[in-house]
Amino acid sequence: MNHQMIETIFAETLNQLHLSEPQKGVLRASLTLFSAKGFEKTTAHDIARMSGVSENIVPDKASLLAAVVTPMINHVVPESFDALLAEFQAKTAMSFTEVLTTIFQERLAFVDQNRLQLRVLYREALNQPLIRAQLAEKRQQLFQNSTINELFTRYQVSGEL
């Protein structure tokens, strides 16, 4: 599978929002720097320098974190989940064990390719109850998807699950 990188999905999401180019640049730089250096070690100066803006227009780090994490929870996670569902549905000729093995391997590759960005999301989810709650709510919404139920029902009927 061709894994779409989180930074690409994030950039596409920012393009859909009503933000100026400098604002988008600040958010892209924030994601990159939070991923590379960690939230705690990233400074407004670092973000301003990477995004090519004046330091005085860079919001406080807490606001930036929320502005980075929210699109990840609301857009990146669902798009990644939809890709996982599409993979699952495309493997109808495979046994349940083969499907799980294949999808597990592909998701590991996705996580490996996006580990720095995922680290931002999950580290902050561990540290901040509000982010953890938002992520849990999104996960619950995604797993209420009827497609998942249909897929599991198919394997239950065949006796594989």
Image (cartoon, helix red, strand yellow):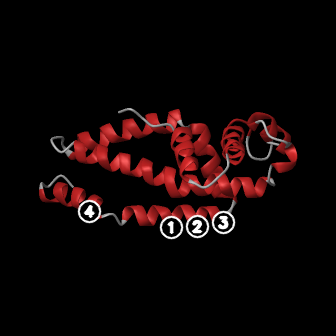
Q: Amino acid at mark 1?
A: Glu
Residue highlighted by disc 4: 149
The residue lying toward the viewer, choosing from 22 and 75, is 22
Q: Amino acid at mark 2?
A: Ala
Q: Amino acid at mark 3?
A: Pro
Report if the CB atoms under discs 1 and 2 are less than 8 Å apart: yes
Residue highlighted by disc 2: 133
Residue highlighted by disc 1: 137
Q: Which mark is residue 129?
A: 3
Distance from Cα at disc 1 to Cα at disc 3: 12 Å
Residue 100 point in image, percent of width and height: 30, 44
Report if the CB atoms under discs 4 and 3 are less than 8 Å apart: no
Residue 35 point in image, percent of width and height: 67, 40
- Callout 4: few (<14), some (14-19), or many (20+) C-alpha neighbours within 10 Å? few
Distance from Cα at disc 1 to Cα at disc 4: 18 Å
Asked which secondary structure carries label 4, the reply is: helix
Asked which secondary structure carries label 2, the reply is: helix
Residue farthest to the left, as pictured = 158
Dot 1 or dot 3, earlier in sequence: 3
Distance from Cα at disc 3 to Cα at disc 2: 6 Å
The residue lying toward the viewer, choosing from 14 and 63, is 14
